[in-house]
Amino acid sequence: MAAQRYPQEDYSRPEGSIEIVLVRHGASAEAVEDQPFELLEGQADPALSEAGERQAQLVAAHLASEPLAGLFVTPLRRTAQTAAPLAAATGLAPVVVPELREVHLGELDGGAFRIAVRRRDPRVAEVFAQQRWDVIPGAETMEGFAQRTRAGIERILDGLAPGASAAAFVHGGVIGELCRQASDSRPFAFVHADNGSLTRIVVLPNGGRWVRTFNEGGHLRL
């Protein structure tokens, strides 16, 4: 009698699970010293740069064939601009989820954080040493950020049927926080998603969550 054989199985989403494709927005306009970005409710709201627009087109070409049940964006225009080519290709109208806007960076919002990083500002070093955005004066608390992003992803899930997939065009800090929640990782383990990259979170029927992929970027190098 032949021995029972057990081949290696490919990964597959469990039946009834939902996949949320988190797309980081494309590259935004350059920050310029003494010329802060236009603010929307206290947060930087730059448009996409030319590079970001190209990234948006590559994202659309990559995701257009996936069976997406919905597209979601934040109130900040760089996410809507990144989603626009995919919306045009699929006919899906993006839904705004305010709770998934970027973390509020207090006195370093408006483009100042980007400048501070390049200048090796000690406040930035302290952010990464403590793995807390709220060491920046006036920044959003970690607890508040976690609570609102959790509420945002639940809003998306509430409108999806079991087995569905959807794409949410969001921000680097949000991707990092949602991956932290799904994996129970250290706070900043996933904060380095590239512009235009894809991160996939699987939500199981019992509510459990997996980080299926992080920072996919092959489509950006075509």
Image (cartoon, rainbow, N blue to C red):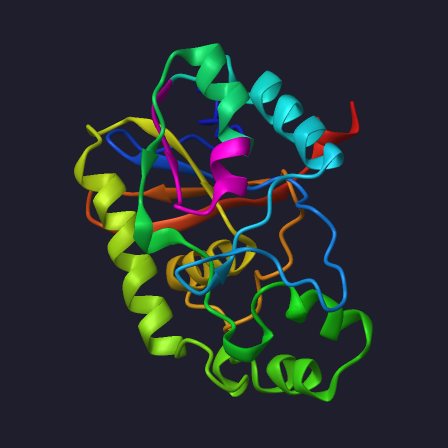
| Residue 129 horizontal/vertical position (percent) | 64, 85
Q: Nearer the viewer, residue 17 or 35?
A: 35
| Residue 5 horizontal/vertical position (percent) | 49, 27
200 in relation to 152, above or below: above
41 in relation to 136, above or below: above
Name which residue lies at 41% across and 57% down. 178
| Residue 46 horizontal/vertical position (percent) | 59, 49
Residue 92 is one of the magenta-drawn residues: no
Name which residue lies at 55% across and 84% down. 136
77 in relation to 53, above or below: below
- Hey, which quadrant is residue 159 in on the image? top left
User: From the viewer's perspective, is 80 left or right of 125?
Assistant: left
Q: Nearer the viewer, residue 39 or 10?
A: 39
**Is residue 140 among the parts visible in the rendering?**
yes
Q: Nearer the viewer, residue 40 or 212?
A: 40
The quadrant of the image that shows the C terminus is top right
Magenta highlight range: 68-81
Name which residue lies at 17% across and 40% down. 158
- Hey, which quadrant is residue 60 in on the image? top right
| Residue 49 horizontal/vertical position (percent) | 70, 39
Residue 71 is one of the magenta-drawn residues: yes
Q: Nearer the viewer, residue 94 or 125?
A: 94
**Is residue 9 among the parts visible in the rendering?**
no
User: From the viewer's perspective, is 141 left or right of 32?
Assistant: left
The quadrant of the image that shows the N terminus is top left
Name which residue lies at 49% across and 29% down. 83
Q: What is the number of callouts on the image?
A: 0
Residue furthest out toward the front: 35
- Hey, which quadrant is residue 41 in on the image? bottom left
